[in-house]
Image: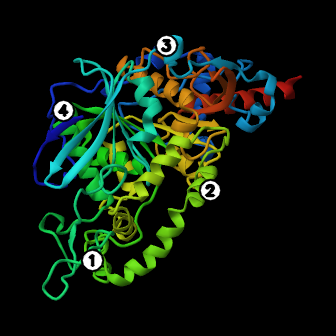
Amino acid sequence: MEILSGHSAPSCQQITLTQKFPEKSLGSFPSKFSRRRKQKFVCDLVKSEVCSLHNSLPSGFRLNRYNGTHKFRPLHALKGVEGVIDVEESLENVTKRKESIPKVLVPGLPDDSKGDLSAPVSSGQWEWKPKFNIHYERSGSRKTGSPQVLFLPGFGVGSFHYEKQLKDLGRDYGVWAMDFLGQGMSLPSQDPTRQPQNDGESQIDNPLWGFGDEPEPWADDLVYSIDLWQEQVRYFIEEVIKEPVYIVGNSLGGYVALYFASCNPHLVKGVTLLNATPFWGFFPNPERSPILSQMFPSAGKFPLAPRVRKIIEVVWQKMRDPRSIGEILKQVYADHSTNVDKVFSRILEITEHPAALASFASIMLAPQGKVSFGEALSRCKTHDIPICLMYGKEDPWVRPIWGQQVKRQLPEAPYYQISPAGHCPHDEVPEVVNYLLRGWIKNLESEGFVALPLLDDESGRYDVAKDLEYVRDGTKKSVRVWFYGSEFSFWSRSSSFVNTQLQGLAMRFR
């Protein structure tokens, strides 16, 4: 168990371009891979005709360009190549041709019993400030030049939810996962409030923390909010990891990852969103809505009002019921054969902590973040931070439409849609997520000379569908993954338009 201490005053760092670390992000170079493999499939005559027709093209053929240096430049799709969607053919039509979907065998998880050793995982406690102890887990190498990857969990879970990434990806990278304050094993070790006095005598023995008369000095202004978590991430990277990272977040962790990257681009080499929630918090933020927020002056702060306790206890008792936890897991995992016993037991264990109820209440009553999901996305785009999207198609909460909206805002970002997979693809299909994540990091670290996952067959950077097969517990399993590449280039769209016009002219002269 590692014990680290780093007492420092929190501060929200909005946008800074100062390079604090000597390492230079390899993701800041344009992709050479696409430039080397770019194919030419229209003749110079057609190109000249396209130029003359440019101004007369329908608006649907015009493309808003993303002027960032992290540009995945599109390659032209080739008709007849398996799994590649032609300009004139929809993804849905292609996926109906089941026999044409290529199969790709990907590695399974390491199996120690068969000699395929997994990376050893260690846990630690980092004391951010007095009474603020952060639980984290780590694996892999700290050697100079070895990429460091930080995983951020979703709501209600913790670093244990990334065990399959720690043991597998830790064989190649330095891998970290931490619990947000107020969740997992990062709950306070003491009651954040002072319990009411009984006629000047001893305090009343209250098994539930956070509902006392007044806050303890260390918990003054404490709110378990998205702003607190993004500050926590910044200090953890600066004081514990001590170098820029690839940051991966699931659900709530995805929002925090994006928010953090938008405020601290110098600490981030890339962001991967795993079914990231696009919103968090029900109450107005004081900085974004100063007048409206006055109606909720103590939102999420300790001590929580007695009337809040009465309401939240009813909700809490329902949520912490083992049957409710089981039903929630059944909802978010598309494949019900997935073993979730560990996840179930760890969630149940967290709910039994005396600080769990008040922490849950603080999270539910916390204000929205200073930076919205959309604003964070725009800032990341401005700072040219590489973003990769991986979404489980059968997620009942963050449905594919949310990932597709992100894709429309960042047309050059690779987007992988996995099916069947639900809200937690990293735990449900870790073999696939680890394979895609490895490939994406290799693509950035090699400055584009290594192809993105699923694009190693010279097929191009359009929409690709492939069946990824892997072996788990001696049984072969398979999921379908769709790769949505960058938007069709101007030449791709306009050449298709010109080809159609030329074919029409040829028919007239026959």
**Mark 2 lies on residue:** 327
Alpha carbons under labels 2 and 4: distance apart: 40 Å
Q: Amino acid at mark 4?
A: Lys
SS of the residue under disc 4: loop
Alpha carbons under labels 2 and 1: distance apart: 33 Å
| Residue 252: percent from left, percent from top | 42, 52
SS of the residue under disc 1: loop
| Residue 386: percent from left, percent from top | 38, 34
Give the left or right position of residue 259, taking residue 112 as reference: left
**Mark 1 lies on residue:** 298
Alpha carbons under labels 4 and 1: distance apart: 35 Å
**Mark 3 lies on residue:** 116
Q: Closer to the N terminus: mark 3 or mark 2?
A: 3
The C terminus lies in quadrant: top right
Q: Closer to the N terminus: mark 3 or mark 1?
A: 3
Give the left or right position of residue 44, taking residue 186 as reference: right
Residue at 45% x, 15% y is 117
Q: Is residue 444 above or below residue 253?
A: above
In the foreground, 445 or 224:
224
Q: Residue furthest top?
A: 115
**Mark 4 lies on residue:** 242
